[in-house]
Amino acid sequence: MIKLSLKEVANRIKGIKNALILCHRNPDPDTLGSAFALKHIFEHLDASARVACCDRSSSKFDFITGGFDIASDFDIHSYDGVIAIDVASSAQLGDYSYLADKVSLIIDHHEACTRFCDYYEDFASACAMIVFDIASELGIFYSLPSHFYECVYAGISGDTGCFKYSNTTKQALIMASELVDTGIDFANINYIIFDCKSVGEISAQCMVYGCVELFEDKTLAIALITNEMKKKHGVSDDDIADIISSVRQIEGVKVAVTIKQSSREEGKFSISSRANCDIDVSEICAKIGGGGHPRAAGATLEGVSATEALDTIRDLFIEGMKAYAK
């Protein structure tokens, strides 16, 4: 695997005429914003690009996707370049992990990236910051449509928790200020990502507060969300997409974890974790094939029951937290 410079990445992008841009499973504002911003770069260079993900994105992120169904079918053979963006490992491609050997370029900002092909990485606050740099390297930053700046801002704001998380850097704030200067409605973007809640999302919050369990002297919070619970409370997968944020808000909690059963595969569970302290949850998730950031990481468990999933994750995180306490 070859580590590329920013200039080399820019040159590779200029050499692609029809790109497939892959996002990570359970797409968030950073992977979506980075992907659609990169799509604008290709289009400005008179190339074409298509964004794809194994999971559909939440309708609240239609301002990024334009309502495009990123999970719709495509022909992998019709692309001369496949880029994985904000993807730390082939496992994060989810049901598209079989395409890992087709990926020609990784653009990523995770410290735990497995680098399964040629890559460019910068441990920035958000992957969207790398796309900002690519546009600048190509000399086209100020020639792109307004939607490009909205996508990049959404990625940066999304991964920094609206600039509240400890991963927020001076450079992230500088880039955000430059994006604000382009005239985008940054306040509305922040409102959509962080504050706007559907009736279903409010119901999901009530549901999760009723099922969350506390361990390790109430410093570890785990919420198991099954399909039966979703049906009972009338909530959809979209409604629980960011439910981890509600769990991490509980006073005294150092690590928050959600275990979400797949609506399509009963024995498949998506794990999301967040740390409110210096406990590296990406290291814990890596033990079951996951990864991410020190304070925000995920993984997938397959072929287990809901009880087995809870037992496995509870034991894994208790062990991990005890190891950090030593």
Image: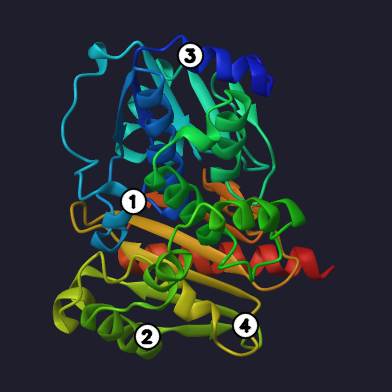
Tell me which corner region of the image, top left, top right, bottom left or bottom right, holds residue 199.
bottom left
Q: Which residue position holds label 4? A: 253
x 65%, y 51%: residue: 125
Circle on res. 14? 3
Sequence order check, earlier mark of 3 and 4: 3
- In the rendered view, would you say 168 is above or below 123? below
Q: Which residue position holds label 2? A: 211
Q: Is residue 253 left or right of residue 95?
A: right
Label 2 with label 3: CB-CB less than 8 Å: no
Q: CA distance from mark 1 to mark 2?
A: 32 Å
Q: CA distance from mark 3 to mark 4?
A: 47 Å
* Residue type of the residue flagged with mark 3: Lys
Asked whether 157 or 204 is in front, the reply is 157
Q: CA distance from mark 4 to mark 2?
A: 15 Å
Mark 2 Cα shell of 10 Å, populated few (<14), some (14-19), many (≥20): few
Q: x%, y% of residue 109?
A: 62, 41
Tell me which corner region of the image, top left, top right, bottom left or bottom right, holds residue 228.
bottom left
Sequence order check, earlier mark of 1 and 2: 1
Q: CA distance from mark 4 to mark 1?
A: 32 Å
Sequence order check, earlier mark of 1 and 3: 3
Q: x%, y% of residue 53?
A: 31, 39
Sequence order check, earlier mark of 4 and 2: 2
Q: Nearer the viewer, mark 2 or mark 3?
A: 3
Label 1 with label 3: CB-CB less than 8 Å: no
Label 4 with label 2: CB-CB less than 8 Å: no
* Residue type of the residue flagged with mark 4: Val
* Residue type of the residue flagged with mark 1: Ile
- Pick the quarter of the image with the C terminus: bottom right
Q: x%, y% of residue 170?
A: 76, 56
